[in-house]
Image (cartoon, grey):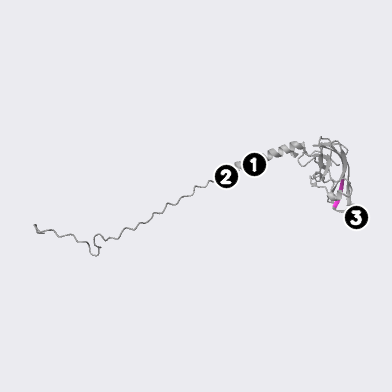
Amino acid sequence: MTYGQNPPQWQPPTGAPPPGQYPPQQYVPQQPWPQQAPPSKKVGVGKILLIVGGVFVLFCAGMGGLIALTGGDSDDTNSSNKPAAGLNEPVTDGKFRFTVTKVACGTAKIGSGILENKAQGQYCLVSMTIVNVGKQEQGFDGSLQKLLDAKGTEYSNDEAAAAGVSETNTLFLDINPGNSVKVTLVYDVPKGTKPTAIKLNDSMFSGSVKVALT
């Protein structure tokens, strides 16, 4: 460069628009930040077990109160393998006093006509007297009275066959305080079966009591 000469003027680069003619800057709207959903609250396994346990405790408490109202105890505490009495000896469970008076097995057919019933094996008939010794009406249910053999096998009352030998309905029978009724329960058991006891119940919540039949 030679000193004393004016420096060359600045020239815009080739292809650039003239000064003052630049295009305006385009405005791009900002998108809002996406909102995150609040974290879900998960119930732990421990809390679930605690809730289930609480419901079970309340259920057991309710059942205990119902048992107390019926006047019965649990089957584990009141029912034993040893019969409490034998034929013609009264026993009490809840509001009922039972006296088993007769047992007869070997019958193949009961009733006649439309009331005729034929045993699959053989019929065993158990006759008894029931007295309501409580202070309120109580319903007797023949289906709750179980016949037992020497192995502890339980047999249920055949209500249809019982209707052919007893005028008393043994399925649902209401007995007022102080009243007594005579019923005959009928059990269809395999041929050759020898019943050894009968388990009698005031209700499905009572403790039950056994009477020896041999």
Q: Is residue 132 left or right of residue 205?
A: right
Quarter-wise, where is residue 210 in the image?
Answer: top right
Tell me the CA gap for discs 3 and 1. 53 Å
Residue at 68% over, 38% down = 61
Question: Judging from the image, what secondary structure is the residue with disc 2 in?
Answer: helix
Residue 211 is inside the magenta segment: no
Residue 205 located left or right of residue 10: right
Specify the quadrant that holds the N terminus.
bottom left
Helix, strand or loop at mark 1:
helix
Residue at image point 75% right, 36% down: 69
Indicate the amino acid at tag 2.
Val
Residue 68 versus residue 152 in the image, above or below = above
The label shown at residue 45 is 2
User: Which segment is the magenta one?
Assistant: 121-125
Q: Label 1 vs label 2: CA separation?
A: 16 Å
* Numbered badge on residue 55: 1
